Amino acid sequence: MTDSKRLKSQAAFAKAKRLIPGGVNSPARAFHGVGGEPIFISHASGQYLFDIDGNRYLDYIGSWGPMILGHAQPQVIEAIRIAAEKGTSFGAPTENESRLAELIMAAVPSIERVRLVSSGTEATMSAIRVARGATGREKIIKFAGCYHGHVDSLLVAAGSAAATLGVPDSPGVTAGNTKDTIVLEYNDPQSIVDTFRQFPTEIAAIILEPIVGNMGTVVPTPEFLKALRQETTQHGAVLIFDEVMTGFRVAYGGAQSLFGIEPDMTTLGKIVGGGLPLAAYGGKASIMDNVMPAGKVYQAGTLSGNPLATAAGATTLEILRDDPPYEYLETQASRLAAGLKNAADAAGFPSQMQRMGSMMTLFFNEAPVVDWPTANRSDRKRFGKYFWGLMEEGVYMPCSQFEALFFSRTHRPEDIDETIDAAHRVLARME
Ligand code: HOZ
């Protein structure tokens, strides 16, 4: 995109940088992974984003996952409007919180009790605390390249913007914060067995993205999944699936419904809030009943179960339940994946297309990506050129090699075709 097409965004970014660290309120949106500066959004509708310079983009970020119904979905907007007219926050219980809890529990049967919070970070932080409280143990296992928000104890070898910016271990996170965090490689079942052999009674929980989105899309092997469930069960540890990204995305019941594995706890975010700040954690009643005031593990929030967010989330889940888009998304996703891969092949660039439902990543990589070391061998520079080429074409992809793209039910087959054609043009002129 030529500079003259985004003068207003440039001015807005210059101003924001004087006011906000790095000009953004979350590093993933800063475009550091691709060079250059972010565009500033004016509004969005259906499959399109519009920036403040008046450029229109086919959106493949979807607010990093939530917008599965497309932007400004009329029923969701109406639900928010009705809720807002009744008051925006009470700090007291409402019936809509139970409406959303019931929807979550019906969709994800492993969740027997659920607590609503405001962000994915809160959900994973709380799940870890509850798992520790319930087991009386301190150690946790996470996997390199998985990202679970900016929880201190989980901000080790993290994916997403931490990986993009090359700071998978953040300053400010103390050795004390992470001394009980054991980091293993994704898709390595033997390391799980070995770690439990070393610490048979000390591990409170394993947390993972059951399909990774935060080092780009990486799918677990059956052996890895089997070892996770077997070892945690055998040693009395809590298996936590972080389905913030995959919940209601890869299937209505999340990744666990596809793999037929029941985790002990699940974290949800993004789609469950219908585009408003809402997330959730839940699981077996015997574990969740440790949460205060039912139990002794403290967790709280003034805006938890906020009435606007529960209205948006419950309406979104009801639409997804009553008129599921998943078959349509699968058809279009397989077309998009094949088209993007063909475009890379035609241009002679080694690449791997990795996908699960409507989340996918084209890695500029010679070999399949199965864990962080293999993801890390991807050609970031080539990805940056691809990203900016697509921006020129009006296609807004995730601004990092280590993120998944998402699309919505409002993306029409002709939008997918347009995207594939754009990718062919972009890749053909890249060196
Ligand atoms: N969890 C999002 C995808 N990796 C990133 C959103 C953000 O950090 O702003």
Image: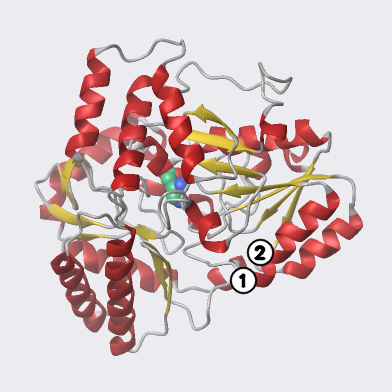
Which quadrant would the N terminus be assigned to in this image?
A: bottom left
The residue labelled by disc 1 is 221
Quarter of image, res 189: bottom right
> Where does residue 252 sit, x and y in percent of width and height?
42, 51
Q: Is residue 431 visible?
A: no
Quadrant the C terminus occupies? bottom left
The residue lying at 42 percent from left, 64 percent from top is 401
Mark 1–mark 2 distance (CA, rounded to whole Å): 6 Å
Q: Which residue is mark 2?
A: 225
Residue 362 locus on image (x, y percent): 39, 72
Under tag 2, what secondary structure? helix
10 Å neighbourhood of mark 1: few (<14), some, or many (≥20)? Answer: some
Residue 61 visible at all: yes
Check contact, mark 1 vs mark 2: CB within 8 A. yes
**Tally of marks:** 2
Q: Nearer the viewer, residue 385 or 373?
A: 373
Please state the horizontal and vertical placement of residue 255, each as a whole percent of the image.
51, 57
Q: Is residue 240 left or right of residue 236?
A: left
